[in-house]
């Protein structure tokens, strides 16, 4: 593993630099020559109509989809050629759109698997559930409102609780760049409120990219908003500026 | 917080289950069965090693291999090669045109021991090879498949093809492998005659002891974090991958472990039955081994042993009376288990029997702060 430090052409303050990113599926460009930069501790929200390429951008950053062209540098390190698990080890965490948790394991075990220790075969065989692990799991469990459900199988959680559990799994992983794909989708009003609260606590001290449709929520947390349309950036900037942009109103907000 | 089950990898109900099985295999069966029937049980138990491997590989990790006979056979052949060389001493084979080599080589006009047979003159090397050769083979297959993200049905079909290829290879290379007849007429292990009833009884107990060692190993793996990662991978492979794990490595590991367990069974088979042939390598025996595991319950380590014993006992008694119906019966049994009892005998036990035996079930909530136990 070699870290490519390309400091001469890049502002070292950027946590994430995406440049000329393109991916084509059988000639269809889902993401087309996309460039954007995320600062340290910045909260960036990506919005856009369905099919704009929002989820694909996250897939590209975390290595689930391979870029056709372009580069993704995270703290100066090129991610496009790294394997998925190496991207995670580099400090990138990803939450999927539908809650992605392990139904057959308990809440405790779900969180424990994301604890950043014993991640290779030998490490996992010799991993011990010591006091530090238990404390951390319990601490995260109380943050995600699941402290009293630790010994329950995750399949018995409600939809909202499953979303929280997955957020907790990312929290315990402690990534420097956190990517959340529609974290409040499919939630009841009260769950939404609690989730917003939860997100406010976990997005501190790290860079965050969020995909979200809930405009009130976006307005609430976003430092900067990027509007995607047909794989390209339509508009970018603070929420107020983006909301006033006639192009954005036409394709998205006006609906 | 209590500390139940944390320092030790076996839960109380596991200990009870292991002790019950031990009493059955070490005391009850040897006392109630004659030596001839006990030898049958000894033979069945060698398949239980394969079923045990399948519990980890298929039940826990979700990797269905339809080629476990390959590893059973490789282990068995390694042991058979050693025994055959010992049986082919110069004085035993002086009527051959080339004395000192196995008889089937002589019949096939081979005049010198092939290079890959030579290490099997040594007993320690043979013991290493029994585990290392199948594990290495599994590593090569697993690495090639899992790094390319081949899985599910495709993996099952490829393992089946490998079982077929290996059978054809063994049958075709008669001069090197003994061909369709396999390696027969095995006599002594390190000078000790393995054909007597007394020797077979000793080998039965060796087999049981090895089986329990493997059962404990399986429990350790299951209760480790690796065991939980296997379950997690079976469920949401991408989530595990994006939590920082190289998923392929874990699959390769569990596939190699299952192969090594199968191979120990194969070696014990050769010792107890006195020969090894390609009929234990191919597609049909490999699928039968999956059925043992399915009947026992693919998530239950001890269930694998009971499933193997039960299906083989049924096979022996049924095929004595209706030999032509047995395969149909076996197929029917498999379909019935998959449709009606997807968790096999162990599932029936846990659902219907254990709740009535409170002290065994271990499902009672202990105290609110008890440590979470690994998923069943």
Image (spheres, helix red, strand yellow):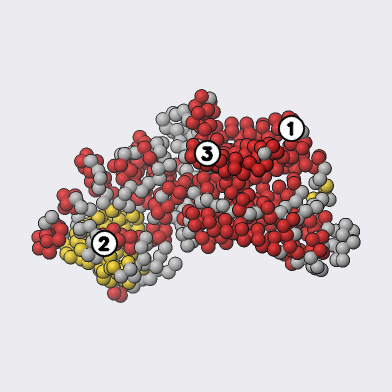
- Compared across the picture, whether B12 is left or right of A44 comes to right
Q: In the figure, B153 relative to B325: above or below?
A: below
The mark found on residue B336 in the picture is 3
- Residue that numbered label 1 is attached to: B33
Q: Earlier in the sequence, mark 3 or mark 1?
A: 1
**Residue at the spot 67% in from the left edge and 51% down from the top edge:** B280
Which is closer to the viewer, label 3 or label 2?
3
- For the residues labelled 3 and 1, the Cα–Cα distance comes to 30 Å
User: Would you call the spot at circle 2 few (<14 residues within 10 Å), some (14-19), or many (20 or more)?
Assistant: many
- Are marks 3 and 1 in one subunit? yes
User: Would you call the spot at circle 1 few (<14 residues within 10 Å), some (14-19), or many (20 or more)?
Assistant: few
- Residue that numbered label 2 is attached to: A53
Residue A53 visible in rendering: yes
Quadrant in the rendering for residue B142: bottom right
Q: Is there CB contact under 8 Å for labels 1 and 2? A: no
- Residue B303 position, x and y percent, is 57, 38
Question: Which element is circle 1 on?
Answer: loop
């Amino acid at each position: 593993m070699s870290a490519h430090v390309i400091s001469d052409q890049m502002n070292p303050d950027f946590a994430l630099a995406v440049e000329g990113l393109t991916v084509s599926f059988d000639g269809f460009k889902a993401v087309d020559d996309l460039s954007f930069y995320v600062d340290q501790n910045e909260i960036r929200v990506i919005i856009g109509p369905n099919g704009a390429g929002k989820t694909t951008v996250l897939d590209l950053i975390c290595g689930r989809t391979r870029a056709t062209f372009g580069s993704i540098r995270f703290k100066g390190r090129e991610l496009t050629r790294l394997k998925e698990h190496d991207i995670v080890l580099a400090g990138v965490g990803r939450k999927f759109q539908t809650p992605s948790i392990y139904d057959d394991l308990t809440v405790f075990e779900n969180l424990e698997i994301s604890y950043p220790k014993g991640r290779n075969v030998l490490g996992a065989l010799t991993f011990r559930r010591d006091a530090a692990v238990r404390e951390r799991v319990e601490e995260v469990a109380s943050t995600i409102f699941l402290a009293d459900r630790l010994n329950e199988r995750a399949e018995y959680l409600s939809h909202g609780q499953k979303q929280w559990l997955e957020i907790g799994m990312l929290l315990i992983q402690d990534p420097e760049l956190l990517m959340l794909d529609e974290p409040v989708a499919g939630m009841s009003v009260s769950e939404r409120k609690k989730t917003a609260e939860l997100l406010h606590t976990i997005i501190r001290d790290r860079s965050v990219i969020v995909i979200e449709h809930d405009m009130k929520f976006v307005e609430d947390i976003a430092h900067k908003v990027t509007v995607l349309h047909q794989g390209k950036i339509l508009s970018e900037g603070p929420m107020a500026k983006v909301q006033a942009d006639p192009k954005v109103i036409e394709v998205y907000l006006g609906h | 917080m209590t500390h139940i089950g944390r320092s030790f990898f076996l839960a109380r109900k596991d200990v009870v289950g292991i002790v019950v099985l031990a009493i059955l295999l070490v005391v009850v069966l040897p006392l109630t069965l004659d030596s001839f029937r006990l030898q049958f049980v000894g033979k069945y138990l060698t398949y239980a090693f394969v079923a045990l491997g399948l519990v980890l590989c298929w039940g826990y990790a979700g990797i269905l291999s339809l080629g476990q006979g390959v590893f059973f056979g490789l282990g068995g052949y390694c042991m058979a090669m050693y025994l055959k060389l010992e049986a082919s001493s110069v004085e035993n084979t002086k009527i051959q045109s080339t004395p000192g080599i196995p008889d089937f080589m002589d019949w096939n006009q081979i005049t010198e021991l092939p290079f890959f047979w030579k290490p099997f003159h040594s007993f320690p090397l043979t013991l290493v090879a029994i585990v290392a050769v199948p594990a290495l083979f599994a590593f090569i297959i697993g690495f090639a498949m899992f790094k390319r993200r081949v899985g599910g049905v495709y993996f099952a079909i490829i393992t089946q093809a490998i079982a077929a290829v290996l059978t054809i290879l063994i049958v075709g290379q008669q001069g090197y492998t003994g061909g369709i007849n396999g390696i027969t007429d095995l006599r002594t292990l390190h000078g000790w005659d393995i054909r007597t009833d007394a020797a077979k009884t000793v080998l039965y107990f060796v087999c049981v002891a090895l089986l329990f060692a493997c059962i404990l190993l399986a429990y350790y793996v299951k209760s480790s974090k690796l065991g939980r990662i296997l379950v997690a991978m079976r469920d949401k492979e991408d989530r595990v991958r994006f939590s920082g794990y190289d998923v392929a490595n874990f699959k390769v590991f569990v596939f190699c472990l299952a192969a090594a367990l199968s191979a120990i069974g194969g070696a014990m088979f050769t010792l107890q039955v006195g020969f090894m042939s390609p009929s234990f390598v191919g597609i049909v025996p490999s699928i039968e081994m999956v059925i043992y595991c399915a009947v026992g319950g693919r998530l239950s380590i001890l269930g694998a042993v009971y499933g193997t014993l039960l299906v083989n006992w049924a096979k022996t008694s049924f095929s004595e009376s209706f030999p032509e119906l047995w395969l149909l019966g076996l197929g029917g049994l498999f379909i019935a288990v998959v449709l009606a009892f997807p968790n096999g005998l162990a599932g029936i036990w846990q659902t219907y029997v254990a709740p009535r035996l409170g002290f065994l079930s271990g499902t009672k909530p202990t105290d609110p702060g008890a440590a979470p136990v690994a998923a069943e």
